[in-house]
Amino acid sequence: MYPYIPNTKDDERKMLEAIGIDSIDELFKDIPENVRLNRELNLNPSMSELEVSRYLTKLSQKNKSINQLTCFLGAGAYDHYIPSIVNHIVSKSEFYTSYTPYQAEMSQGTLQYIFEYQTLICNLTGMDVSNASLYDGGTALAEAAFMAANITRRNQIIISKTVNPQYRQVLKTYGHLQQLEIVEIEDDGGVTNLEELKEKMSDKTAAVIVQNPNFFGIIEDLKSIEEVAHSEKKTLFIASMNPISLGILKKPSTLGVDIVVGEGQPLGISLQFGGPYLGFIATKKEFMRKMPGRIVGKTVDIEGNVGYVLTLQAREQHIRREKATSNICSNQGINTLAAVVYLVTLGKKGLREVAVQSAQKAHYAFKQITKSGKFKPLFDKPFFMEFAVTSDISPSEISKKLLSENILGGYSLEKDYPQYKNGVLYAVTEKRTKGEIDKLSSVLEGII
Amino acid sequence: MRKYDKLIFHLSREGRKAYTLPKLDVEEVSIDELIPSEYINDEELDLPEVSEVDIIRHYTNLANKNYGVDTGFYPLGSCTMKYNPKINEDMVQLDGFKNIHPLQPEETVQGALRLMYELDQALCEISGMDKMTLQPAAGAHGELTGLTLIKAYHENRGDTKRTKIIVPDSAHGTNPASAKMAGFDVIEIKSTEEGLVDPESLKAALSDEIAGLMLTNPNTLGLFEREIVEIAKLVHDAGGLLYYDGANANAILGKVRPGDMGFDVVHFNLHKTFSTPHGGGGPGSGPVGVKKKLMDFLPTPTVEKDGDRYYLNYDIPHSVGRIKDFYGHFSMMIRAYTYILMMGKDGLNRVSDVAVLNANYLASRLKDYYNLPDNTIYKHEFVMAGLKLDLPEVTTLDVAKRLLDYGYHPPTIYFPLIVHEALMTEPTESESKETLDEFAEVLIKIAEEAKNNPELLKEAPHYTPVRRLDETRAARDPILKYEG
Amino acid sequence: MKVLKDLYYTKDHEWLKVEGNEGYIGLTDFAQDSLGDIVYVELPNVDDEFEKEEAFSAVESVKAASDVYMPVSGRILEVNEALLDEPALLNEDPYKNWIVKIELADLSQLDELMSSEEYEKYLEEEV
């Protein structure tokens, strides 16, 4: 007997009788003999909760968490403060054990929070419409590229190398499927090279893609980039943005961005070794019907009561099949709810404070670390909450020394940017204290 | 239960606060000294101001408007809405799993890598494949990944003629959508009267332009493709590869494995077969398994073992690249692995036993009232072609809406497309005989209502918070956000 | 199902009204009925050129979506913008509410289309 399988042998007997057969085996007799497994699966026998829990707890203890190590690592995933209330709401089983809200009458809870999520993303970015979320920042960027190719009927995508290397890798994999030409632009002192962009733009360009703040933490001059991107009439301007940075930086809608994408992990989602996270996408009204993924809309029922439904479904796979805007069949569900709760918990003043504190602390850390000259700034550009420094010491040595002091150091850049050998990218969020930052800089200072 | 109609924005009042943060403890510098003022947004953010009390009450009231597996039965065909064990949720909360950064040095995350490796091995054993990638974020994403691998395989052989994928007309919509997204053209083949793949139609469609065939077995009608060995041979002889959509794997756990049936690439839906929660739409997880011939193309990184050390392998000779950020949905992997450990080889075998028994039992109770083919052995699901009585004005939609009045989530409706007025039902092994009996009795009652009192169905639902929402209006004049 | 005389018809349920070397294209009554409440019509741009059987438009309902194909090759002269605000017009009167006006590229292609009688027969037999 198993806790998740209620029917007993007695139930089984009654059911077999009702069907009119002698054993369950008869229900599998149509499986050809020559493919049947005919042996036990080579797995552990069933276990009790205590045994499973003991085993997995032991495994978890072989990891060092960011509660044991002070985290100065970012590069696409961030250690932000998650208000207690988030976990309590996403743990409600009416939310997390429910199905996709195709049957609207039974899913008004889910549909409504998605509607709130769409609203919040639009309010944060200034864009007209948002969908119910995509898998993560990288795939959201790839989907935006597909969208642009579809809208403009062109197949060239120009992307700055200051965009997260993982996102560019995902774009490359996806782009190959649809024969998109991906053109990467080198960085110019840590920012998008405008001259090269001007050179590469043509009437084949479907979109120009940048990230803000970029992978190096630097705030790009989106206004100037937009002028170049839109110098070609049809070309779309796509920006991947950190949602926390929108607590302080200008909204992309005011900067001529056509499609905004990004990684929503900083919005109340734990690090979880990389996933599941939350991709967001928002765009202008004219591109609404070209957006991939689920969308929730407001409507009324037959009694005139306000209600919410999945809408514009004719774009999606279950109706349009091979003509769908994308094959995506899910959104990030419970992660979307986490982002909603995070955003409304922090609210108007809170998100700003998180952004400001992160920026203040990052700049303080920068000052402390580069004070003696042992570590030099890699770039000379304004940054938000991540910055890169370089030195004569190898990043692996730095990492080792920091770990020995229970500090999780920054990201080594040379794997993705060989020209920045010994460059390390540090992230400082509102969670870090002055004490922690002082300790980081003193340990770094002490390395020989 | 009180009616609750508010959006969180309606609760916003100036000055209310739900968060707390420590005061800034580093020396404060004027913001425009840190960031040029032309980049800064001087306006107030357009976010609500509410208290923690407001938030908890609001979302608790929303939760009360929802239905989950924890509330009741979800007979949705093809979704495998089985119970989500609570120990899974506890394991996800372990500090050493929840709070680790994906880019930490590998020596600090050996436990996580080991879990991934062991899950990989377990899924290989269950599927009969040689190696998994745990990276895909969902079933559809798994399909896209698998198709990307098939494409790479042919390209690597220098065979650029294979631009088409065959899909049966009974297939789930993601199959052709994924094929199209992967850059293939889609050829649809007609099923037999029974709803199975027709080897003759397949033969006619096969050529040197075919990259592969996507199948699910059992198929979307809950029937096992008995000719699978012949189908596999036909496809392989024509130079194509065979893709297994694992949506229906719950029916065959421990009985037969896709790898042994001749499939070259497989995806599993952890949120179906392996009990991870559906989350109101996600996150899912769609690991993909391959035979040796496709291993060189797997997305980077995979998880490997060298002695006692686990590591991320980026050195895959002809890798298709990354298909998503980082390594996949780790928290879903924890849940699925917890489930596999709890159930073990005997439990998983019992899953398919009871899933199939429950489906056949429920079908036997309904066959006099709903259209079902005679003398059919189902696997884990079955499809009714509407009411047995010939009542053209009473549709499957009406039956579904009336089920809401009895407190049930309806089965999947109007899918698969090849069945008229389809009601696709999958009870899963989580349901007891009493639940199935009660459900059958309600469906029988509804069939009788359809005959004697059809307005009860046409005007249903009567008791839900909203009734028959105007979807046309929502699509004609989309309102996708709150405007205040 | 309403079928108007003096129009040309295609197997994909489009109709074509010819006036000299110009024509109007729309959906038949059968098409709008199958789709259900139409919620959106995607229109091409004026001066776009399409080949016979190429998709020049798409029509969406709540539960389905359909491409609309050129019965003959041609160039778009006008698009019916009223359909953008009121897609329901296609349901109300699919023959009065045309989708595009075209200039025909090759009048001989008309021979390949069905007459109203042939289309009626086609509806009875095939569909």
Image (spheres, coloured by chain):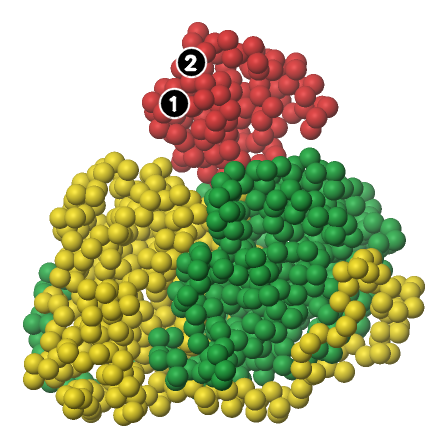
Chain colours: A yellow, B green, C red
Residue A230 relative to residue B207: left or right: left
Q: Position of residue A199 (x, y in %)?
A: 17, 43
Task: Please provide percent x and percent y for residue C63.
Answer: 57, 44
**Can residue A311 be seen here?**
no
Graded by Cα atoms within 10 Å as few (under 14), some (14 to 19) or many (20 or more), the crowding at tag 2 reads some
Neighbor class of circle 1 (other Cα within 10 Å; few <14, some 14-19, many 20+) is some
Residue at the disc numbered 2: C105
Q: Is residue B394 above or below residue A418?
A: above
**Tag 1 near tag 2, CB within 8 Å:** yes
Which quadrant: the C terminus of chain B? bottom left
Q: Is residue B135 left or right of residue A216?
A: right
What's under tag 2, amino acid-wise?
A: Ala
Residue A40, x across and y down, in percent: 75, 75
Q: Is residue B414 above or below residue B163?
A: below
Spatial CA span between label 1 and label 2: 9 Å
Labels in figure, total? 2
Q: Would residue A199 be seen by someone viewing this image from the given angle? A: yes
Which chain's residue wears label 2? C
At which x and y percent is residue B112?
Answer: 47, 80
Looking at this view, is B132 or A333 the one in front? B132
Q: Residue furthest top?
A: C20
Residue B121 sits above or below residue A431 on the image:
above
- Label ID, residue C49: 1
Q: Tag 2 or tag 1, which sits nearer the N-term?
A: 1
Of the pair B401 and B322, the residue shown nearer to us? B322
